[in-house]
Image (cartoon, rainbow, N blue to C red):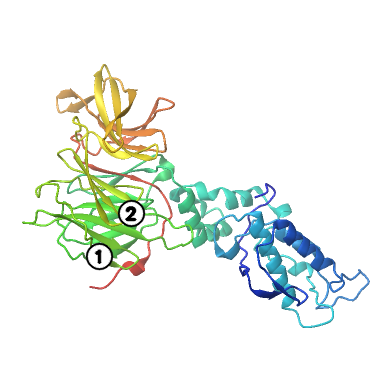
Amino acid sequence: MDDDVIHHSWVFVEKPKEAEEESDIHGSPRKLKTKPSIKECEQTLHDDFSSSDVEKHSDSDEPNSDTEVEEDYLLDIEETEDYFYGMDFVVDNYDRAIAKYELLRKFTSEQPSSPKRTLLVSDDQQFPKHIIRKGEMKIGDVVMANALYFLPAKSLCRCKAVSKRWNDWISRPFFAHRQLMEFKDFSGLFCQLPGGLSKFIPKSAAYGVPKPSLSFLPETVTIKSSCNGLICCKSVFQDDYYICNPATEKWTKIPRPGLYHGPEVAVGLVFVPDTFSFKSNFEIVCVVNLPDDRMINFEIFSSRSGEWRVAESICCELREDVKLKPVGFYHSWKLYWETVDGYILVFDLKDELYGGILQLPPASNPNGVLTQMNGEICYLLPRAEGNGYWTIEVYGDMDMKLKQEISVHFGEISVQFGPFKAKSDCRVLAYVDDGTLIISIGDNVEAYCIKQQRMTYLGKEASLFGNATYLPYINTLAEVFPEVEKSE
């Protein structure tokens, strides 16, 4: 789109239909066999408004309610970055030309039948009041229209206090959907000890959440999975699940599953925003190991149907007493769960098929993590080199072979255990933002930028013994739709 085109508000027009009989602004039938080019659309506009049927009166003429077209109005429409067909994305010049033509055709065709079918647009009616023209824009309007989408949810809540206009803008569903699509920055970590309340370690003060313990939910929960700003939680007392957005404190309760899950069930949440819909659906996949059953089942909840279903595909390769880590990792329509004995269980959600077993590196231990790096699934494992130096080994591909080593220097870090001191282990928690390692070492959680080789303190470690659950989180305005909840 041209640089001088500025977005102000939405303009809703009728989408032109192809290969249908339509009338131009003079009432003559025409047929759109193919999509016209931009040049053809602009030429049609020029011809329509320069013909003998469309006359502009001089200043001495008496204004007529059915006459006079202000060309200024056409220019003002062209100077706006329109959101056509109700969709919150920038359209190209071709769609703009089509929409401008259809908008003007609609305006003129609504006038009463007369020999001169023209439209009078007075000064106070020339442009909608809620749309600011390019020449009248201030710096605040430019920021509101182009920059706010890239801020985290906490900062946006504070921006609502700037003015009533900003508050109305940020509160619109269009804005929330656009922010969900644009904002992808790592915002912090939710962490929780077994039996305790969750807490949040933010990337900075701008990324916080109002209630890190999720106390806005009706009961005590265990965090299970996170995806694009939504958190999946499970009741500590029974098989009740909740989906919530900690930034907005909106939540919904999921119907109880058909199978018994138990407190240690492995869970994966998949929430992929839909460009063409405000209601982005989500799925919950649970790995269920029934007593006295050597098969592993996959039970899936879909917000589209509001119901649970058991996948036909099952896993028979793992022992019936295998223990999986409770948090699943999502990447490219596949879910991955680590087992405590060095394997990875894979489930293909798109086809609802069991995806096989991957072997972790022989040296894998609780200090490693399964994460996404450079667009693929990887396993990161720290190895001590001595004198405060560590090597982060990066394993990838289907055979989990060693692909890269990252050298990190933390210095000598000790942990106080009462009157004693001991050297601390390093634990990798996540790889985020295409170049940052989230690491816990000592009793600190640090963000290490690989390119700049710089360490940034984030917060205190939840546990020194590696048994806390950590969930990377993105601070978005993702909507949670209450209609998912059903009465039992």
- Left or right position of 255 against 480: left
Q: Is residue 217 visible?
A: no
Q: Residue lying farthest right? A: 60
Question: Which quarter of the rendering shows the C terminus?
Answer: bottom left
Give the total number of marks visible in the rendering.
2
Residue at the far bottom: name it. Answer: 113
Residue at point 38%, 51% (across, down): 229
Q: Nearer the viewer, residue 178 or 217?
A: 178
Against 387, is 402 above or below?
A: below
Element type where label 2 sits in the image: strand
Residue type at mark 2: give it.
Answer: Val
Spatial distance from mark 2 to mark 1, Cα to Cα?
Answer: 15 Å
Position of 199 compared to 64: left or right? left
Q: Position of residue 316 (x, y in %)?
A: 14, 51
Residue 230 lies in what quarter of the image?
bottom left
Where residue 15 appears, x then y in whole percent?
Answer: 61, 68
Look at the picture and state if 282 lies above or below 199: below
**In this orientation, does residue 373 appear?**
yes
In screen coordinates, is 417 left or right of 87? left
Q: Position of residue 434 (x, y in %)?
A: 42, 36
Q: Quadrant of residue 286?
A: bottom left
**Which residue is tagged 1?**
308
Q: Residue at x 44, y 51 (%)?
A: 153
Circle on res. 235? none
For label 1, the SS is: strand
Left or right position of 225 against 291: right
Q: Crowdedness of circle 2 by 10 Å Cα count: few (<14), some, many (20+)?
A: many
Residue that numbered label 2 is attached to = 270
